[in-house]
Image: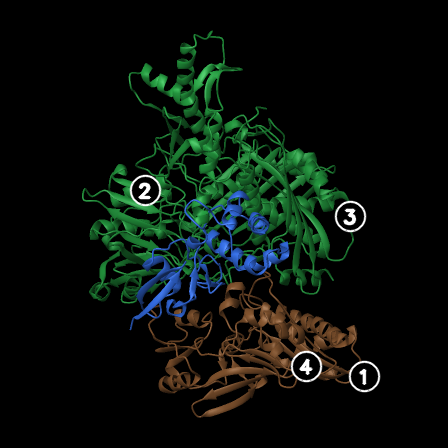
Chain colours: A brown, B blue, C green
Amino acid sequence: MIVRFEYFAPKSLDEVLRLLDEYGPDACLLAGGTDLLLKIRAGAVTPTAVIAIKAVKGLDLISFDTTKGLFIGATALLSDFAGHPAVTKHYPALRDAALATANVQVRNMGTVIGNLCNASPCADNAPTLIAMGGTAVVESRNGGRCVPLEDFFKGPGQSVIGPGEIVTSVTVPVPPKGSGASYLSLSQRSRVDMSAVGAGVFVRLESSRIAQASIVMGSVGPVPMRASKAEAILAGKRPSAALFARAGEAAAKESKPISDVRASASYRRQAVGVLVERALGEAAARAKGD
Amino acid sequence: MKHVIELKVNGDSYQVAVDPWRTLNEVLREDLNLTGTKLGCGTGDCGACTVLLDGRTVSSCLTLAVEAAGKDIRTVEGLAPSGEELHPIQEAFIEEGAIQCGFCTAGMELSAKYLLDRNPAPTEREIRASMSGNLCRCTGYDKIVAAVDAAARKMK
Amino acid sequence: MAAFDIVGKGVPRTDARAKATGSATYTDDIKLPGMLHGRLLRSPVAHARILNIDTSRAKALPGVKSVITGADIPPVRYGNWRLFPNLQDEYALARDKVRFIGDEVAAVAAVDRDTAEEALGLISVEYEELPAVFDVDAAMRRGAPLVHDEVEGNVSLDRKIRYGDVESAFKEADYVRKDTFTVQAVSHAYLEPCSSVAQCDQDGRITLWTSTQVPYIVQCLLASTLKMRENDIRVIKPTVGGGFGGKMELRPWEFCAAFMARSTGKPVKFTLTRREELATGRRRHPMKLISKVGFKKDGTLLAKDLKILLDGGAYNAMGPTATFLCGNFGAMLYRYPAYRFLGLHVYTNKPPASAMRGFGAPQSLFASETQMNLAAEELGIDPIDLRLKNAQVPGDEIPDVATISSCGFRECLENVAVMSDWKKKRKSKKKGYGVGIGCYSFISGGVFNWFNTQYAFSTAEVRAFADGTVHLLTMASDIGQGSDTVLKQILAEELGLAMQDIRLTTADTAMTPQADLGTWGSRVTLMAGNAVIDAARQIKEQLFGAVSARFNLNVIYDLECKGGRVQAVGKPERGVSFGEAVAMVQKTNRGKALVVRGSYTPRRKGLVTPAFSFGAQVAEVQVDQRTGLVDVKNMWTAHDCGTVINSKSVEGQLEGSLHMGLGYALSEQLVMDGGVTVNDTFLDYKIPTALDMPHGVSACVPTYEPEGPMGAKEAGEGMVSPTAPAIADAVHRATGYRCMDLPITPEKILSGMKNKG
């Protein structure tokens, strides 16, 4: 493919918004570029303007506050995120998901939010962020809005973000007392691979019972998908291996995987059940250890 | 429209006019004749094009040259302190037999540097994880892992 | 066994420093003044007649200097089969028909790559699509579309081997089993994509720098396709980033670069993309193998009847040799009193398969080693014991094919059993745990002369100088395996010199002596090594004469080159430095340079190879029974490669083989959807990473190969074969799933476990 575009590297968010407004659907935002450049070369997108946002000051912020929770800026690198002390301490499952994303070099270029905005069903960072109640902060020249990540994805490669809009940050609430989360993924082929299946779960225990459970599965549907029937099985129950196995089975039934070069639908369904079961075990252990 | 940018490579400044879609890999190899950096896949999967950008390993095939403007770029050509002296990582790669066809070597050495700059005494597992974005088809990685380990000891 | 000074040591590679500093020059690193960039237009359809090609719009694009199609070039078919011209079935650019997705249809040369790429989009080709065939069964069906109109039934070649009375042996057998195996296509996945740069001088002579394993073959076939004389073409192999069999033919971009350099008067470079490499490049043959074996109750092998269908893709490429060799390997390792082989090389509308590390052995040995394990299980005999009972030993004859000289196979089996603690581990009943075994034998170069060369198979020129240095010139091609270092070591050892005393010029068809058949079939160490020794001995003969005369030595004295000196054995005072001895020879000859040529051509070595290597490997796996994920924990290997010339290189080859064998077993497969290669990136064509590799332990079984240089033979190619059957056997012990169709995927394991209940 012959690739030609104009390139802008604005220094301020206002300037980003102005360019987004000016070029509308012909603009693409460039953060890490690891997905965008491949899409451009494959002809999947044909922007006339590429707007790089890494030069915007402060957009790479990662911060944690015991009341407001975690703040992830639009250009926060996957490697910085995975290595951030607060993430390691309070959000180990988010760290695991970031570390499961692509390879070292890509994590040094790519961003957490870019991974979400690419809106691939196998985005490693999506399931756990959704399960933990993350919210995207979206801005445009016409103002801002907050979108719960659960409502963020619309289909393969499609999110709610429209022309003129940018996700400037994602926030995640402070993990409540007695809660734990986990992200597990697998590939059939290598330890460094695009995940063929992933599961991000969050559980909160109250008096040794499951007061809240969120299960989000990756790569088993057009978007990262919630396993609500599996969640219902858990509600109010005492955590146990048998319970998690039942939840895993239910999640597998709910999943809507397709077959592709990385795995068949039936394998994905079987594997996602196992991952949900195991992730629940890990999340519950983390919840108890709190 | 071409952008006139300044690239700081291995401490030297170059002014180049580049189309915005050209990658750092192309500009290093074609405009600056720094051909030690290889191109193995063009999709960020093999690591042969790895360079250090502000101290971090990146795939130069997925980095636009305009994005690298003003940043500190280090390539394999900038590893050795002089024509006669080698960097300890290079010495270790030679001594341990970590080089066969050599096409992955530049990227491997820079990934090793990135690791050792942050973690001067990595475990074998840490070395393997850190080098796992660099594919090698010849060595089976054992001697590369041994070389990084040996380099860590040399650099102490 | 002789004690060596340099041979056997882990001497650092000659080219390591250049590679470590990034200064080694690979083909794509070459930039010549005025150089044009070439791109190839490839067929988007699997099988079609070309009705019309319109290049006018491409030619009109500013910056485009040349556009060529099959109609513009001499209609000369090529292939490495000069001895069998009917097997030469390729044109550099398609004429009349395209036969696979990726078949080269046209080429563009332009001032830069983007312009060349843009021009490709401006060429319009009218195709009349034809029905296509995508597997061997469909291709051989009556009335199937013909990939090559002149080849009825799409079988381009058959190969038969037969000895002993197979029918009565099966009648005598207590236990007979017949199994069908299939194996997938995999990519060489060398990290350096193919690249070529051609330049034409004012006399019309062409120089081609190209990433190749076979400069001599490229030179000759370029000459025939360009209708030029061989020596008007100079092929230079720069540093090569791996080949593994994938760079051992003349390729269309080499032809196009040379043709367009001549027609435009400007240098032309072609470099392939990884996508082109994976989607359209050469690959290891997928095969269907039907094998019947017969044993006595006590495990004695009686007979084998093997039929192999090779899915060759659209052209012969190196398929005919693979057809021959997979039949040969079907009867290696064990004594088969009766053997019958039928190999059929079948055309399909897919990218051509060709030589790849093991050259027919990985496929054939996956089948026969798995079948040995199946038989061992049913006969109730430990698989290592069953192998020991039937193992080949030195002096064994394979009728009409070869006599085995050195052979440490039994020792390999015994060794690997001890190293891996086989007996104990094999009994383990731990869930999801298993150990398994696979073995291999391989060749040390081919005896066959399908290229019909009039030259010696390998040649070496040595020039000795009075300053104590020597210059070794050989066309042998180091593609990363380390032959430059090994040849230097052999020469240094023979002449008693140090590595730094030797200057090396290799793989330049105009500067190094004709000829060398190239790097394939593990031939370089043995054949080029023997040529170097031949040259070194001629040098020594002259030096010894001069020193003998100078010290008036009794003619019964032995002389030696040692430690930089030429001297009477054990009498260093009766000798001079190497340089002084050279000067004496030159003075004796009134100024004539001391230059000699050595050569090697295998003779009276049967039909296959001068020497066989052997080995045995044990795999230990832990399988996650819920997800089917296989964790290969340990691999133990014992192998017999004769004398080790460079210990680091041999280890490196073994570790690299393990990598490729692991990929073949578990993760690698070119997935086809009809004629489309679905996984054309390294994201989805998965070679193992540093995190995927098991812990490996290896041991060399000492043997001495009389035909090899200093007793050496093959190391590093054959070892790619045992890994898949060993892992498959271990997975079977761990899960009950027996893999008969590579690769072993978690999916297959889970469904295999389910079927077993």
Q: Where is residue C521 shown, x and y percent of the image?
A: 48, 39
User: Label 1, label 4: how many angstroms apart (C-alpha)?
Assistant: 17 Å
Neighbour class for label 4 at 10 Å: few (<14), some, many (≥20)? Answer: many
Q: Foreground residue, B106 or C520?
A: B106
Mark 3, Cα crowd under 10 Å, few <14 / some 14-19 / many 20+, is few
On the image, numbered disc 4 is attached to which residue?
A: A175
Q: Which chain carries label 4?
A: A
* Residue closer to the observer: C4 or C327: C4
Numbered circle sitting on residue C235: 2
* C-alpha gap between disc 3 and disc 2: 57 Å
Report x, y in % for residue C458: 41, 32
**Gap between marks 3 and 4, in whole Å?**
48 Å
Residues tagged by mark 3 and mark 2 found on one chain of the structure: yes
Q: Tell me residue C576's x, y (percent).
A: 43, 17
The numbered mark 2 sits on a residue in which chain?
C
Mark closest to the chain's N terminus, 1 or 4: 4
The amino acid on which the numbered mark 2 sits, given as a three-letter code, is: Val
Q: Which mark identifies residue A207? A: 1
Q: Quadrant of the C terminus of chain C?
A: bottom right
Camera-nearest label, 2 or 4: 4
Report the chain holding disc 3. C
Q: Give the SS element for disc 3.
A: helix
Q: Distance between the residues labelled 2 and 4?
A: 66 Å
Q: Identify the secondary structure beneath mark 4.
A: loop
Which kind of residue does numbered mark 4 sit on? Pro
- Quick check: can you spot residue B77? yes
* Tag 1 and tag 4, C-beta contact below 8 Å: no
Give the structural element (helix, strand or loop) at label 1.
loop
Q: Identify the disc placed on residue C564.
A: none
